[in-house]
Image: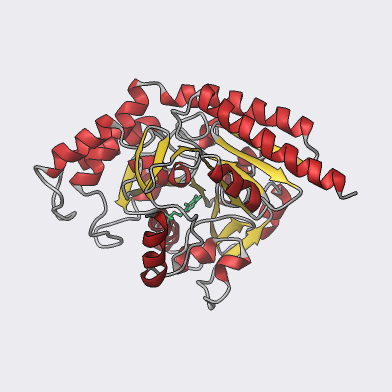
Amino acid sequence: MNKEIRQRADKVIASTYNRFPVVLTHGKGCNLYDADGKRYIDFLAGIAVCNLGHAHPRVCEALKKQADILFHVSNLFYTMPQVELAEKLIQHSFADRVFFCNSGAEANEACIKLARKFFHDKGESNRFRIVSMKQSFHGRTMGTLSATGQDKIRVGFEPVLGGFDFVPFNDIQAVRNAITPDTCAVMLEPVQGEGGVRCPEADYLRSVREICDEAGILLIFDEIQTGIGRTGKWFAYEHSGVKPDIMSLAKALGNGLPIGAMLATERTAKAFTPGAHASTFGGTPLITAAALEVLKVIEEENIVESCRRTGGYFREKLFLLKEKYSIIRDVRGIGLLLGMELTIPGKPIVDQCLENGFIINCIQDHVLRFVPPLIISREEIDLLVTCLDTILGSIQMKSARSF
Ligand SMILES: *Cc1c(COP(=O)(O)O)cnc(C)c1O
């Protein structure tokens, strides 16, 4: 059955993705099942999206309940779930105002537009340039791919949107040097996700904040991957104590439903006046009712704290593997956003994990990324680590024999 569906898909779906040869049909918690009935333990969570796992009963119930009364009315009207969701996001963050949209890229588009509009409204339209990071990832729209510091994402789509200046992540002096009288903001991910799970060095974010304040420019954090508990805090910026002026969210906010959000301080958000920006589907009652329930479950079940503890346990287990296998170059990350850098390509290991019933993925060719639902158990982690141990052991043995 898997094979027949795959053949049909490969004829009609745009081939923008290299897909695993698996047709998934349903899930429950951290388990996914394919069309042949095989079970997988999910350490990818739809790419850091399904923090509460699959088919969470409370989220399903909230969605069904709202579906029966009202899907959509446009943002020409007020709706209750949208207000409540915004209030909850503000309660947990630095922000005073929220703009809702449908995806991560759209949230970052809103960040870029707000930063430019903020200075335009102050009579400084020359200030439109944004300092962004090499190896960053901000999305695939023309605006956000222009903000993305990876050539492979821009090739074929030039000319890109102008006004982005790239500096190496974790290099304070480079940020300082890149700021000109035309710079309106510095934009970065507090932990680079797609770029290879790269964490900021101690004081890096604080120094960037200081530089922005001295220059009188805005600080934008892309927390699309790191936000909503993933790193063991509600938002990754909390680890550093540094607050941005603008922040984007998306992935885990709807536990799999399409929603993005741009959050900002009052002073900054003022530049978004009526007509300045818009989204037809942004913040519909259907999706915000479900997202509100997601946040309530995270609060009531202390999911953020348990992520911090489980993440620490997982990280330790990965470090034990690193001591054992020289093909592991580095283990890094925070909370349940973890990466294992290898000296060899990661794809064969990902494929072997899949065969053994574990879903993980590989970024930047040689970094295995682990972003399971935040409700993953220690037992499930142990099962994956045992599987990795076996796979890495057989690889290391083969390479030893070839010498
Ligand atoms: C996934 C991601 C995006 C893009 O989100 P989409 O919903 O795919 O548009 C942007 N920034 C970061 C940090 C991401 O991880």
Q: Is residue 399 left or right of residue 39?
A: right
Q: Could you tell me residue 26's position as x and y percent?
A: 33, 42
Eyeballing the image, is 229 above or below 250? above
Q: Residue at x 54, y 77 (%)?
A: 158
Q: Residue at x 11, y 46 (%)?
A: 70
The number of numbered discs placed on residues in the rendered structure image is 0
Q: Residue furthest right?
A: 403
Which quadrant of the rendered structure holds the N terminus? Answer: bottom left
Q: Residue at x 58, y 49 (%)?
A: 351
Eyeballing the image, is 42 above or below 152? above
Q: Is residue 228 left or right of residue 231?
A: left
| Closer to the camera in the image, 376 or 385 | 385
Q: Is residue 92 left or right of residue 314?
A: left
Res. 370 image quadrant: top right
Q: Residue furthest left?
A: 69
- State the colouring used for the structure image: secondary structure
| Closer to the camera in the image, 155 or 243 | 155
Q: Is residue 89 visible?
A: yes
| Closer to the camera in the image, 319 or 356 | 356
Q: Could you tell me residue 342's position as x and y percent?
A: 72, 46
Q: Residue at x 48, y 44 (%)?
A: 225
Q: Could you tell me residue 359's position as x and y percent?
A: 51, 43
Res. 31 image quadrant: top left
Q: Is residue 180 visible?
A: no
Q: Could you tell me residue 166's position as x and y percent?
A: 63, 61
